[in-house]
Image (cartoon, rainbow, N blue to C red):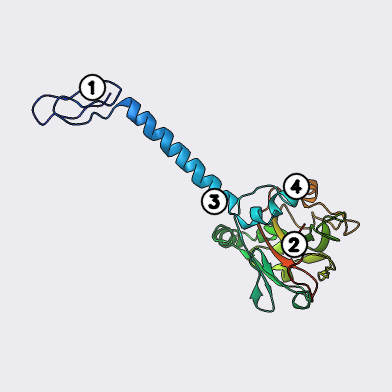
Protein backbone atom coordinates (compact mmCIF):
# COMPACT_ATOMS: atom_id res chain seq x y z
CA UNK A 1 0.00 0.00 0.00
CA UNK A 2 1.21 3.48 -0.86
CA UNK A 3 -0.01 6.45 1.21
CA UNK A 4 0.26 10.21 0.84
CA UNK A 5 0.85 12.76 3.57
CA UNK A 6 -2.24 14.11 5.31
CA UNK A 7 -2.37 17.89 5.13
CA UNK A 8 -3.90 17.95 8.63
CA UNK A 9 -0.89 16.17 10.06
CA UNK A 10 0.46 12.68 10.14
CA UNK A 11 0.59 10.18 7.34
CA UNK A 12 -2.63 9.09 5.79
CA UNK A 13 -3.26 5.43 5.32
CA UNK A 14 -5.99 3.15 4.24
CA UNK A 15 -6.92 -0.32 3.23
CA UNK A 16 -6.81 -1.79 -0.23
CA UNK A 17 -10.35 -0.60 -0.94
CA UNK A 18 -9.26 2.92 -1.92
CA UNK A 19 -11.04 4.72 0.96
CA UNK A 20 -10.27 8.25 2.03
CA UNK A 21 -7.31 8.55 4.40
CA UNK A 22 -7.74 10.61 7.57
CA UNK A 23 -6.68 14.02 6.20
CA UNK A 24 -9.05 13.87 3.22
CA UNK A 25 -6.61 12.67 0.58
CA UNK A 26 -7.17 9.51 -1.46
CA UNK A 27 -4.76 6.72 -0.73
CA UNK A 28 -3.20 5.21 -3.85
CA UNK A 29 -3.62 1.51 -3.10
CA UNK A 30 -2.58 -1.75 -4.63
CA UNK A 31 -6.15 -2.52 -5.63
CA UNK A 32 -6.39 0.79 -7.51
CA UNK A 33 -3.04 0.01 -9.12
CA UNK A 34 -4.37 -3.36 -10.32
CA UNK A 35 -7.58 -1.85 -11.66
CA UNK A 36 -5.67 0.75 -13.65
CA UNK A 37 -3.39 -1.94 -15.05
CA UNK A 38 -6.36 -4.06 -16.17
CA UNK A 39 -8.05 -1.07 -17.82
CA UNK A 40 -4.84 -0.12 -19.62
CA UNK A 41 -4.26 -3.71 -20.79
CA UNK A 42 -7.76 -3.96 -22.26
CA UNK A 43 -7.38 -0.56 -23.90
CA UNK A 44 -4.12 -1.56 -25.58
CA UNK A 45 -5.66 -4.84 -26.70
CA UNK A 46 -8.74 -3.11 -28.12
CA UNK A 47 -6.73 -0.47 -29.98
CA UNK A 48 -4.32 -3.08 -31.31
CA UNK A 49 -7.13 -5.27 -32.60
CA UNK A 50 -8.90 -2.26 -34.09
CA UNK A 51 -5.77 -1.22 -35.99
CA UNK A 52 -5.10 -4.78 -37.16
CA UNK A 53 -8.64 -5.13 -38.46
CA UNK A 54 -8.27 -1.92 -40.44
CA UNK A 55 -5.11 -3.16 -42.20
CA UNK A 56 -6.03 -2.99 -45.93
CA UNK A 57 -4.39 -6.37 -46.54
CA UNK A 58 -6.75 -7.81 -43.92
CA UNK A 59 -9.79 -5.93 -45.22
CA UNK A 60 -9.00 -7.13 -48.77
CA UNK A 61 -8.49 -10.69 -47.47
CA UNK A 62 -4.97 -10.83 -48.90
CA UNK A 63 -4.04 -11.86 -45.38
CA UNK A 64 -5.82 -15.19 -45.25
CA UNK A 65 -6.26 -16.02 -48.93
CA UNK A 66 -2.62 -15.47 -49.95
CA UNK A 67 -0.49 -14.67 -46.90
CA UNK A 68 -0.36 -15.19 -43.19
CA UNK A 69 -0.05 -12.13 -40.98
CA UNK A 70 3.42 -10.57 -41.16
CA UNK A 71 5.35 -7.50 -40.10
CA UNK A 72 6.22 -5.09 -42.88
CA UNK A 73 9.91 -4.18 -42.73
CA UNK A 74 10.78 -2.84 -46.19
CA UNK A 75 9.30 -0.29 -48.56
CA UNK A 76 7.72 -1.70 -51.72
CA UNK A 77 6.66 0.76 -54.41
CA UNK A 78 4.84 -0.49 -57.51
CA UNK A 79 3.98 1.96 -60.30
CA UNK A 80 2.24 1.62 -63.66
CA UNK A 81 2.97 4.57 -65.95
CA UNK A 82 3.80 6.82 -62.99
CA UNK A 83 0.65 5.79 -61.10
CA UNK A 84 1.64 4.25 -57.79
CA UNK A 85 -0.32 1.22 -56.67
CA UNK A 86 -2.03 1.58 -53.29
CA UNK A 87 -3.88 -1.20 -51.51
CA UNK A 88 -7.35 -1.66 -52.96
CA UNK A 89 -7.02 0.82 -55.82
CA UNK A 90 -8.53 -0.13 -59.18
CA UNK A 91 -6.64 -0.43 -62.45
CA UNK A 92 -8.09 -1.50 -65.80
CA UNK A 93 -6.37 -4.11 -68.01
CA UNK A 94 -5.32 -1.39 -70.46
CA UNK A 95 -3.39 0.32 -67.65
CA UNK A 96 -1.39 -2.76 -66.69
CA UNK A 97 -0.35 -4.15 -70.09
CA UNK A 98 3.33 -3.52 -69.47
CA UNK A 99 5.20 -4.68 -66.41
CA UNK A 100 5.32 -2.09 -63.64
CA UNK A 101 8.26 -0.30 -62.14
CA UNK A 102 9.03 -1.87 -58.78
CA UNK A 103 11.36 -0.24 -56.27
CA UNK A 104 12.35 -1.72 -52.94
CA UNK A 105 14.23 -0.38 -49.95
CA UNK A 106 14.01 0.90 -46.42
CA UNK A 107 16.15 2.61 -43.83
CA UNK A 108 17.39 -0.66 -42.35
CA UNK A 109 18.28 -2.03 -45.77
CA UNK A 110 20.04 1.17 -46.86
CA UNK A 111 22.11 1.21 -43.70
CA UNK A 112 23.13 -2.37 -44.25
CA UNK A 113 23.81 -1.57 -47.92
CA UNK A 114 26.31 1.11 -46.87
CA UNK A 115 28.04 -1.28 -44.49
CA UNK A 116 28.34 -4.30 -46.73
CA UNK A 117 29.48 -2.31 -49.76
CA UNK A 118 32.77 -1.77 -47.97
CA UNK A 119 33.23 -5.53 -47.84
CA UNK A 120 31.73 -6.29 -51.27
CA UNK A 121 29.05 -8.49 -49.76
CA UNK A 122 26.05 -6.82 -51.41
CA UNK A 123 25.98 -9.86 -53.70
CA UNK A 124 24.23 -11.74 -50.90
CA UNK A 125 21.60 -9.10 -50.03
CA UNK A 126 18.78 -9.94 -52.42
CA UNK A 127 14.99 -10.09 -52.72
CA UNK A 128 12.34 -12.11 -54.54
CA UNK A 129 9.15 -10.55 -55.94
CA UNK A 130 5.96 -12.53 -56.60
CA UNK A 131 2.81 -11.28 -58.35
CA UNK A 132 -0.27 -13.49 -58.08
CA UNK A 133 -4.02 -13.46 -58.71
CA UNK A 134 -5.93 -15.35 -55.99
CA UNK A 135 -9.25 -14.87 -57.82
CA UNK A 136 -8.58 -16.78 -61.07
CA UNK A 137 -10.56 -17.55 -63.08
CA UNK A 138 -13.38 -15.86 -61.14
CA UNK A 139 -13.80 -14.65 -57.55
CA UNK A 140 -16.86 -16.88 -57.10
CA UNK A 141 -14.95 -19.99 -58.22
CA UNK A 142 -11.19 -19.41 -57.86
CA UNK A 143 -10.18 -22.94 -58.82
CA UNK A 144 -6.88 -21.73 -60.32
CA UNK A 145 -5.86 -19.89 -57.13
CA UNK A 146 -3.22 -18.60 -57.16
CA UNK A 147 -2.36 -17.67 -60.75
CA UNK A 148 1.27 -16.58 -61.07
CA UNK A 149 1.64 -13.43 -63.19
CA UNK A 150 5.26 -12.57 -62.49
CA UNK A 151 8.30 -13.85 -60.61
CA UNK A 152 11.56 -11.94 -60.24
CA UNK A 153 14.50 -13.17 -58.17
CA UNK A 154 18.01 -11.96 -57.29
CA UNK A 155 16.88 -8.33 -56.92
CA UNK A 156 19.80 -6.39 -55.38
CA UNK A 157 19.15 -4.37 -52.27
CA UNK A 158 17.74 -0.82 -52.57
CA UNK A 159 17.16 -1.20 -56.33
CA UNK A 160 14.16 -2.64 -58.15
CA UNK A 161 12.76 -5.55 -60.13
CA UNK A 162 14.42 -4.37 -63.34
CA UNK A 163 17.79 -5.28 -61.81
CA UNK A 164 16.73 -8.82 -60.89
CA UNK A 165 16.28 -12.04 -62.83
CA UNK A 166 12.86 -12.45 -64.41
CA UNK A 167 12.37 -16.21 -64.04
CA UNK A 168 8.66 -16.10 -64.93
CA UNK A 169 7.90 -13.35 -67.44
CA UNK A 170 5.25 -10.75 -66.75
CA UNK A 171 1.77 -11.70 -67.95
CA UNK A 172 -0.63 -8.77 -67.87
CA UNK A 173 -3.93 -9.30 -66.02
CA UNK A 174 -6.94 -9.92 -68.25
CA UNK A 175 -9.82 -10.84 -65.94
CA UNK A 176 -13.05 -11.84 -67.66
CA UNK A 177 -15.31 -12.26 -64.64
CA UNK A 178 -15.59 -10.22 -61.46
CA UNK A 179 -13.03 -8.16 -59.60
CA UNK A 180 -9.60 -9.76 -59.21
CA UNK A 181 -6.97 -8.87 -56.62
CA UNK A 182 -3.46 -8.59 -58.06
CA UNK A 183 -1.03 -9.11 -55.20
CA UNK A 184 2.67 -8.21 -55.12
CA UNK A 185 4.68 -9.91 -52.37
CA UNK A 186 8.31 -9.23 -51.51
CA UNK A 187 10.61 -11.67 -49.70
CA UNK A 188 14.20 -11.48 -48.54
CA UNK A 189 16.28 -14.05 -50.40
CA UNK A 190 19.06 -16.13 -48.83
CA UNK A 191 21.51 -15.99 -51.74
CA UNK A 192 21.90 -15.60 -55.48
CA UNK A 193 20.33 -18.26 -57.71
CA UNK A 194 18.62 -20.03 -54.82
CA UNK A 195 15.04 -19.52 -56.08
CA UNK A 196 13.70 -21.13 -59.24
CA UNK A 197 10.64 -20.95 -61.45
CA UNK A 198 7.72 -23.31 -60.82
CA UNK A 199 6.57 -25.64 -63.58
CA UNK A 200 3.30 -23.81 -64.20
CA UNK A 201 1.44 -20.60 -63.41
CA UNK A 202 -1.92 -21.91 -62.22
CA UNK A 203 -2.49 -23.16 -58.67
CA UNK A 204 0.69 -21.51 -57.47
CA UNK A 205 0.86 -21.16 -53.68
CA UNK A 206 2.85 -18.25 -52.29
CA UNK A 207 3.13 -19.66 -48.76
CA UNK A 208 4.32 -23.06 -49.99
CA UNK A 209 6.75 -21.38 -52.39
CA UNK A 210 8.24 -19.32 -49.56
CA UNK A 211 8.62 -22.40 -47.40
CA UNK A 212 10.24 -24.40 -50.22
CA UNK A 213 12.98 -21.81 -50.74
CA UNK A 214 13.37 -20.74 -47.10
CA UNK A 215 12.23 -17.19 -47.81
CA UNK A 216 10.59 -16.75 -44.43
CA UNK A 217 7.75 -14.30 -43.91
CA UNK A 218 7.11 -11.52 -46.43
CA UNK A 219 8.76 -8.16 -45.82
CA UNK A 220 6.22 -6.15 -47.85
CA UNK A 221 3.06 -6.58 -49.91
CA UNK A 222 0.60 -4.45 -51.87
CA UNK A 223 -2.37 -5.21 -54.11
CA UNK A 224 -4.74 -3.60 -56.59
CA UNK A 225 -8.14 -4.59 -57.97
CA UNK A 226 -8.67 -5.31 -61.66
CA UNK A 227 -11.72 -6.23 -63.73
CA UNK A 228 -12.48 -6.32 -67.44
CA UNK A 229 -12.20 -3.04 -69.30
CA UNK A 230 -15.94 -2.41 -69.53
CA UNK A 231 -16.64 -3.82 -66.07
CA UNK A 232 -18.09 -1.71 -63.30
CA UNK A 233 -18.96 -2.74 -59.77
CA UNK A 234 -18.23 -6.41 -60.45
CA UNK A 235 -18.51 -9.23 -57.98
CA UNK A 236 -15.67 -9.83 -55.54
CA UNK A 237 -16.89 -13.20 -54.32
- Disc with the residue nearer the chain's start (2 vs 3): 3
Q: Is residue 175 visible?
A: yes
Q: Residue furthest right?
A: 199
Which dot, 4 or 3, sits closer to the camera?
3
Asked if disc 2 and disc 3 are in contact, CB closer than 8 Å, the reply is: no
Tag 2: Cα neighbours inside 10 Å, few (<14), some, or many (≥20)? many
Which dot marks residue 181? 2
Say what secondary structure mark 3 lies in.
helix
- Using the rendered view, name the quadrant where residue 160 is placed: bottom right
Q: Position of residue 39 (x, y in %)?
A: 42, 36
Q: Which mark is residue 70?
A: none
> Above or below — where is 59 with respect to 14?
below
Residue at horizontal 74 percent and vertical 54 percent from the top: 191
Q: Which picture quadrant has residue 231?
A: bottom right
Looking at the image, which residue sits at the far top? Answer: 15
Tags 3 and 1 in contact by the CB under 8 Å rule?
A: no
Q: How many marks?
A: 4
Say the numbered circle drawn on residue 214: 4
**Sequence-wise first label, 2 or 1:** 1
Q: Which residue is mark 1?
A: 14
In percent of width and height, residue 149 lies at 82, 64
Query: Gap in Å between the C-alphas at discs 3 and 1?
Result: 40 Å
Question: Where is residue 199 drawn, in percent x and y?
Answer: 91, 56
Q: Is residue 199 above or below residue 92?
A: above
- The percent position of residue 230, horizontal first and vertical second, equals 79, 76
Task: Say whether residue 138 is left or right of residue 224.
Answer: right
Looking at marks 3 and 1 on the same chain, the residue that comes earlier in the sequence is marked by 1
The residue that mark 3 highlights is 51
The residue closer to the viewer here, 6 or 205, is 6
Q: Give the secondary structure at mark 1.
A: loop
Q: CA distance from mark 2 to mark 1?
A: 62 Å
Amino acid sequence: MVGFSDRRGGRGGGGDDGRWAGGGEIVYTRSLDLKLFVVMAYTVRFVGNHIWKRDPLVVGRVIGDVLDSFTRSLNLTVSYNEREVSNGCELKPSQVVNQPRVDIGGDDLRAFHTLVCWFHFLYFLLATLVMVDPDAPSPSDPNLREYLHWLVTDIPATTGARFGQEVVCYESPRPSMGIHRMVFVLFRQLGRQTVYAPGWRQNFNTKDFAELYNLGSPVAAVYFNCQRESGFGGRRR
